[in-house]
Structure formats: C-alpha cells, structure tokens
Image (cartoon, rainbow, N blue to C red):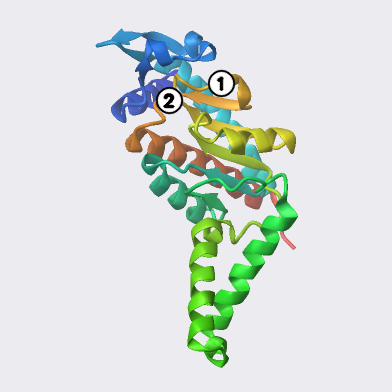
Amino acid sequence: MTTNKENKNLVEALFGVGAHFGFVKARRHPSAKPFIFGAKNKIEIFDLEKTSLELEKAAAFVEAKGKEGAMGLFVGGKSEAREGVIASGRGLEMPFVSGRWIGGTLTNFPEIKKRIARLEELTTQREKGELAKYTKKERLLIDREIDKLHLYFSGLSTLKALPKFLVVIDPKKEHIAVSEAKKMKIPVVALAGSDSNLFTVDYAIPGNDASRQAISFVLAELVKAYKTGKASAAEEKPAA
C-alpha cells in the first residue's frame, strides 16, 4: 500500500516531467473531465493527485502480470513515444510496436506470426551467406523484402503468442490496437491525454501523452512494477 509520502513524491515527480498538461478544452473528451483540475493559458491541467492514483492502479496490475511472468506488448507509434516504447520492450525482453500498427496484429495473429517467421528466416539466411546462390537482382529484391519486414515486424520478433496485456501511449492515436485488444479480451494499460476516451481502456493513466519526458517517466514506472512482480515471484519460488 502506498504511503502519503510516497504518493506526494509521485505527484511531484509527475509534475516535474510535465504530466499535468492536457489540451485545450475544445479537444477534451468527456471521459477526461473528472481528472481535470483547471486551465492555464487555455491549456487544461490534470489533477495529478488523481493521475497518481490511476498510475498506482496500473502499476499494481502490471506488477501482478510480472509475478505471473506474463508477456506484454508495448505500443506507441508517435515520435515522442518511440524511444520509450523501444527501451521498455527491450528492457523487459518484450515485443513492441514503435511505428505504424499493422491491422490484424492481434485479431489475425497467425498471419502476423508467418511474417515474423519470414523475417527471421531471411535474416538468418543473409547472415549465413546463404543468399549468395541467388542472382544480384534476386538478392536486391530479397534485401528489399527484409527491409520492409524489419520496418513493420522487427519489434514483434519475441511475440510467439498473443500478449497477456498491452501498454499503450495515446489510445486515441492507437485506437486500432486498443480495438483489437478489446475484441481479443486483452487488458490495456494506457497513458491517455485529455482528448482520449478513457473508457476504452482497462487502466487509463490520465496525463500528458504528448511529452517525451512524461511518457518515459510513466513507462519507467510500469517497467519497474513488472520487474518488482517478477522478482517477488522468484523469491517465493521454492528451492529445487
């Protein structure tokens, strides 16, 4: 259970990374209204006391997934999110999508698995020099195929089965990913700006989803929570 001091520290940390900034009132989704404290220079300001509580709920969920050893999927294609999403995925050895979401990634997963397998196959063949048997033109076409597959599927190489949860930056932009997760009954944790429909995700963290600093901070908290859960599971595991 979080103490008042810990919660105060979290609120201060969120403020320090600019997590309190929303958008202009005209862009606000009705679901975000309870989390708005006020406005400054026409920009709405999140109530970080409430944001911190929602972040704690999301972190508790992710910690539980860490204890289960469940595989997650990090999603954030806009420029402010890419670095954090890639770092989080790699840090936990989990798949990530840091570019355009490919429709069917969850709802047509068998086909996506084929694309991932194709990328791995061609990459391995190229590394082993096995493409030398092809003509120069054929190798050029294969290289182009590898580049295209790498662009869309390299972050998904560790995705061997459907993820048990998603961590999404900006559910409004990533609405296709959120919609697919809902269809497949996969829980979604999301950092959601004031223009997002918070009701579309299971654990919405209302805050600035357009700031690299705020995004990185929230992702770091979730990664830390997952690692805590994983470590506690390891401690509880009886010795062989």
Q: Residue at x 62, y 75 (%)?
A: 121
The numbered mark at residue 225 is: none
Q: Is residue 233 left or right of residue 152?
A: right
Q: Position of residue 13 (x, y in %)?
A: 34, 28
User: Disc 2 residue type?
Assistant: Glu
Q: Is residue 177 left or right of residue 99?
A: right
Q: Is residue 103 above or below residue 55?
A: below
Q: Residue at x 52, y 70 (%)?
A: 146
Q: Is residue 124 left or right of residue 218?
A: right
The numbered mark at residue 198 is: 1
Q: Residue at x 51, y 63 (%)?
A: 148
Q: CA distance from mark 2 to mark 1?
A: 25 Å
Q: Position of residue 155 (x, y in %)?
A: 53, 57
Quadrant where the image shows the C terminus: bottom right
Whether residue 160 is visible here, answered yes or no, is no
- Locate residue 194: give its quadrant: top left
Q: Residue at x 45, y 51 (%)?
A: 86
Whether residue 96 is visible here, answered yes or no, is yes
User: Disc 1 residue type?
Assistant: Leu
* Within-10-Å neighbours for mark 1: few <14, some 14–19, many 20+: many
Q: Position of residue 188 (x, y in %)?
A: 62, 34
Task: Give whichever of 174, 229 is nearer the camera.
Answer: 174
* Within-10-Å neighbours for mark 2: few <14, some 14–19, many 20+: few
Q: Position of residue 117 (x, y in %)?
A: 66, 67
Q: Are marks 2 and 1 in contact (CB under 8 Å)?
A: no
The numbered mark at residue 6 is: 2
Instruction: Name the N-terminal-most of marks 2 and 1.
Output: 2
Residue furthest to the left: 41
Quadrant where the image shows the N terminus: top right
Q: Secondary structure at mark 1?
A: helix
